Every structure is written in C-alpha cells, then in structure tokens.
Image (spheres, rainbow, N blue to C red):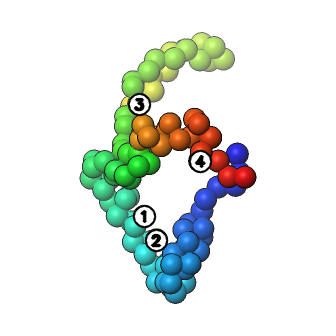
Amino acid sequence: MGKSFTKEDWIRVLMTKGLTRAKARESVEALFAEVKTALEAGRKVILPGLGTVFLSESRRKRVYNPQKKEVVDFVPRKRVSFKTHPSFKKELRSGKGEEA
C-alpha cells in the first residue's frame, strides 16, 4: 500500500486540468465543505463508481474492565463510514486499481 492521497494531491490534479493553484484550492475546499455539510445533515454522499460515504452509529455496548472490576457502558457514537461500489470493489480485487 502506498502513500495517502492528500488534499494537496487533489489540488495538483486540478492544476493539471488548467486551474490555478488558488482556484484549485478553493474548489477542493468547497467540495470538502459540502461533503461535511451533507454528512452533518444526515445525508449520504454518493461518489459514482467509487461508493457511498455516510454516517453510521455504533451500538450501545457493555464491557467489563478487569482492572477496576466494573462494567462500563459505552454510549453510541456517530462515525463516518464508506461502502464501496460493487464494480469498484471488483476492480480492486482483480488488481486493476493498483499502481505499478
């Protein structure tokens, strides 16, 4: 597995498409802000051909802490989840999506 694809990488990709660095940065920032806003509003973000980003909630759990000899309740928390699109998953499994 290689290095992470960062915000700067997104900006460089847009710059190769003819945008200035300032416009590319503004576009990436706007995209990320809209994704965050949609998730906060409880909406799914569908990335065609890649998958869906959505909020999910963990279950309430009761676990035993052996050091303190007590049962601890974990309250449900929201987390960002990603479900891969079936065609993309198939590509990844067949090795098409890997870099040389």
80 relative position to 46: left or right:
right
SS at circle 2? helix
Mark 4 vs mark 3: which is more N-terminal?
A: 3
Could you give the CA–CA distance between mark 4 and mark 2, rounded to whole angstroms? 23 Å
Tag of residue 46: none
Which of the image's four quarters has the N terminus? top right
Asked if the residue under mark 4 is in contact with the one under mark 1, i.e. CB atoms within 8 Å, the reply is: no
Q: Nearer the viewer, mark 4 or mark 3?
A: 4
Residue under label 4: 97
Residue under label 2: 28
How dense is the environment of label 4, judged by Cα within 10 Å: few (below 14), some, or many (20 and up)? few
- The amino acid beneath tag 1 is Phe
Residue under label 1: 32
- The amino acid beneath tag 4 is Gly
- The amino acid beneath tag 2 is Val
Along the viewing direction, whichever of 14 and 76 lies nearer the viewer: 14
SS at circle 3? loop
79 relative position to 2: left or right:
left
Mark 2 vs mark 3: which is more N-terminal?
A: 2
Tag of residue 58: 3
Could you give the CA–CA distance between mark 1 and mark 4, rounded to whole angstroms? 24 Å
Q: Where is residue 26 in the image (x, y as percent from the top left)?
A: 45, 79
Residue drawn 27% across and 49% down? 43
Along the viewing direction, whichever of 58 and 73 lies nearer the viewer: 58
Asked if the residue under mark 1 is in contact with the one under mark 3, i.e. CB atoms within 8 Å, the reply is: no
Q: Position of residue 41 (x, y in %)?
A: 27, 53
Asked if the residue under mark 2 is in contact with the one under mark 1, i.e. CB atoms within 8 Å, the reply is: yes
Q: Which of marks 4 and 2 is in front?
A: 4
Could you give the CA–CA distance between mark 1 and mark 2, rounded to whole angstroms? 6 Å
Task: Name above or below for residue 100 compared with residue 68.
Answer: below
Could you give the CA–CA distance between mark 3 and mark 1, rounded to whole angstroms? 24 Å
